[in-house]
Image (spheres, helix red, strand yellow):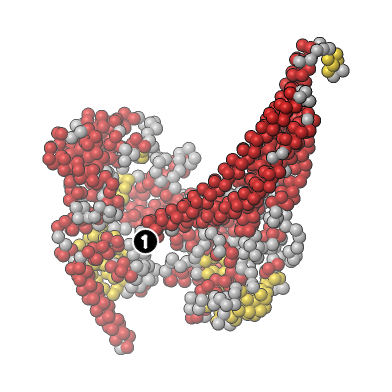
Amino acid sequence: MKDIAENEDPDRLDPSIYRYIIRHTRNDQLVLLALTLISMPFVYLALDIPKLIVNQAIGGTGPFELFGQEMEQIPYLLALSCVFLALVVVNGALKYVNNVYRGALGERMLRRIRYTLYSHVLRFPLPHFRKISGNEVIPMVTAETEPLGGFIGDSIALPLFQGGLLITYLSFIFVQDFWLGIAAIALYPPQMYLIPKLQAKVNALAKERTLNVRKLADNVGETVSGIVDVHANNAGFYSRARVSQRLGIIFDIRYEIYKRKFFIKFLNNFLAQLTPFFFYSIGGYLVLKGQLSLGALVAVLAAYKDISPPWKELLKFYQIKEDIKVKYAQIIEQFTPDGLTDRDKVERRDTLPAEHFSALVANQMSYGDPDDETSILPSSFQTKLDQHVAIVSDDSQQATYLGQIICGLQTPASGRIQFDENDLNAITVSVLGKTTAYCDDSAFVFKGSVADNLMMGLKQAPVSEASEGSDSERTRFIKLAEQSGNSAESIDDNWIARTTSDGRDSQLEKLIGDTLQLVELDGDIEVLGLRQHITQQSHPELCSQIIDTRQRLKDMLTEDVFSSMVEPFNPGSFHTNITIGENIVFGSPVSSDFSLENLHGNESVKDLLAQHDLYESLVQIGYQASKILLEIFSDVPEDSDLFEQYSFIHADEFDEIRRLVAQVEETGQESMETSERQRFLGVAFQLDATRHRLGLIEDDLMERIVSVRQALSEKLGEDNTEVSFFSPEKYNDSVSVSDNILFGRIRYGMGNAREKINLAIRELLTEVGLGQTIIELGLNFDTGPAGSRLTSLQRQKLSLARSLLKQPQILVINRPLLSLDQTSQNRIMQRIRELRDNLGTFVVVDAEEDAARYDATLRISNQRVSIA
Amino acid sequence: MLSGFDDSQLKLIAFTSEALQFHPGDYLFLKHDPSDAVYVIMDGEVEIIISEVDDVDNVTVIATLGKNQLVGEMAVFRESPRSASVRAKQNVNTLKIPNDRFLKLITDNPQIAMHVMRQMSERLFDTTEFARRSQSEQNA
């Protein structure tokens, strides 16, 4: 094993932003400097030509000489005008090239700095994450770096360019008249003295503002993460007050900054306006005395008009530079914590040692602050790495630390911990990552598919290039990434070695299947697969196979059992387990006009209801249902969540419905306005015959609803884009795979029906050879942000499966399945024991008696570790 | 249990709970399941089984409950997973009341709380008797 080299870190964040800029952009800054210098003579000429035109071509008498050619006044005037035009074009072109180059440079550096910050996050020692908040780190990497990128492009070129322009214009004025030149710059010294003084206070305020904005981000982020607890504890008022206070502080700081910034601006403007006073008085005097030509004064005044923008730009640049200096200093302070892991250790890829490590050796190893009771005091122990070892401790935090130290995730404070003779601190992350795995109950599930999460540990390096995408695109991607010091590895490449070229790998599939089975996640994955939505376009063959399973499911369960649990969709009959609205549409709404919430406003539906003499009947039902519901909920406080949970009228509509019912009781139904009828129609559409059990839907009404359904189906036609109708012969793209197989609804009130049906569907799919396909669909299930679409137990099982799938030589299992009952946990742990025979497995156990089942025990007692 | 409610409360309970039927051998819930609701037995009998779900050879029934009795309330009070499985002995009709609704009913209606406490005391007595008998049989 090689030791990690002590070489210079190209990703280091220099203490000074200018040192960072020069280290990474020296050549680019030279190019910009060259471009700036090239443009200067053209700028000077563009100033001089108008003077020649006024004084000679218009005011003088010919003949004149230009480029060695003698010419008369009018050709001379036209030639000079053309030269002027050419200079305008050249100056504009140079400015364009300069701006684009500067912009690209800034963007490259922005990319570099963001990447560097992200890389630094990956190098933070684990304990540092207890001190920082993700909500504060995110704006630092994203929003706070944004102006840094823009500044870096301008950092040298802008002051050089604007300074160059200024010097050019000033030289021009000095050439015209020395004293006018002096007048032009007379007020620069006081500005150069006063502005830094004022700016220093603005800088301090800017620093305070940044810190407070980060705290605001933290407040908002915490509210989002803990939203359930905020609502559960009715902490909304307190949270709002806290944010309000923070916003107040930010307002005060910003107000102070504005006052000071605009005072600086006022001072600059005032001083800038004083200079023309000198020109008019001194210049006018000199013209009157005949010591200065009028043309020269006009040219000087024109030049002064041009001096003002570069000078203002320089002052603005100075203010931005100061602001950026503060931002940069604050960022590097946050991203260079003590104990930052060596870059080489994190990023160098070493090959795995030829043989497994045989022993874990700790020599006077300690962890944490000795005064902290969760720390580990210097301990020496040795254990073989081909056995299963229990970790027992009265303090679960100590057990966690020890487990993480064994995997190299935590660094001992003193002493050494080794795999054989190799100090863990000297082994690269690439080797540790392949050799070890650690999992506990807090395992994180990333946004992406289940498969992405499951195979995370297998993606150590790209094994082959992606077949899609052109070579030129790839070359460009690599070139740009390298120019910005970014990783040139593409996530589109194949990161997992597969045995076949078509991307499938039966060995890997089997390994995944076995692992899911071991942690008892296979059933969940199948259910997730059944919940997936697929389309006939993306999966034509599978959709057709699923239609074939519909009848087979009935055959499998026998017609009677199936009918007792499921009410199938029959286009010719009223469905008693869906709402009236759903019975009319009888399909999945593609357009929102046909959604249950909007259906009562749909003109086509209302017309059809009227044609079938159903409109008034449904309004009447809606009115009756509202009355009953008001009676049922009469004693329930208005803010009760019962409305949302059980009522088919939303809590915020309750008052309006109550008012309407009272009005109808008083004046009769005939007096109802169209909009009021529509409200009752909406209530009727939400009514479900079986679930709500209000006894308002009679047979005759059911028949008329089915007639409206058929009329709607004929009106819209089969190939419409608004409703995907339920059809026994067709796959419905808008509902899940499971719903397509079931083609009906589970009957209300049948205990265990859903479980029985799900089990039957899974058995059927296995029988027809679609089991693996559904698992693959399940593996593609989107886990949502932080795995929020999975249950906590599914997340824990996924994390354990991820660690096992990697097949590490050393695995630390720290109570990863806390959401599972003890018997099931024991069953899974027994399987792991059998699977990982002769592979180092450390298991944190709750009690001393549990440790007896293992080959050895690492016991933490009185903060010291010993082996037994 | 439901006799302590007036008409309007009964209507609300009926509307906000789920009427569920179970066939003989169906489980209302399994040991270690999350406790999401209590069940009022409207008709039929259920068995309380304390053995593990997958231990099919050694099913231990500790009690049988019938009409008007409440089942599943202990885990709801303890906010813990189910400590036993409950299986339908015959065709059973139940009213499934979600745990938050049930706790609200208890806190709002002292007479219902008393009724539940009485049932739980009887259940505790029966369980103690069961344990005592088991121990005697073992000793014998």
Measured as percent of width and height from the top left, residue A771 is found at 46, 52
Where residue A586 sits, quadrant-wise, is top left
Residue farthest to the bottom, as pictured: B140
Above-or-below relation of A250 to A835: above
Name the residue at 63% across, 40% down: A268
| Residue A476 in view, yes or no | no
Query: Which residue is denoted by mark 1 in the rendering?
Result: A233
Residue at 30% of width from left, 81% of height from top? B131
Q: Left or right? Give the position of A642 relative to A151.
A: left
Please, what secondary structure does the residue beneath circle 1 have? loop
Q: Residue at x 76, y 24 (%)?
A: A289
Q: Nearer the viewer, residue A219 or A688?
A: A219
Name the quadrant of the N terminus of chain B: bottom left
Residue situated in front as seen by the camera: A176 or B3: A176
> Is A800 located above or below residue A62 in the figure?
below
Q: Residue B26 is drawn in which quadrant?
A: bottom left
Name the residue nearer the viewer: A327 or A720.
A327
Q: Which residue type carries mark 1?
A: Asn
State the residue lying farthest toward the right: A68
Residue A37 vs residue A467, the one in the foreground: A37
Residue drawn at (54%, 45%), measured in percent from left and top?
Answer: A258
A421 up-or-down from A652: above or below: below
The spot of residue B86 in percent (x, y) is 30, 67
The x and y percentages for residue A292 are 77, 25
Question: Residue A259: where, in percent of width, then height?
Answer: 54, 46
Q: Is residue A309 left or right of residue A449?
A: right
Q: Is residue B129 visible?
A: yes
Instruction: Tell me the chain of label 1.
Output: A
The quarter of the picture where the C terminus of chain B appears is bottom left
How busy is the neighbourhood of tag 1: few (under 14 within 10 Å), some, or many (20 plus)? few
Outermost residue, front direction?
A289
Which quarter of the figure has residue A281?
A: top right
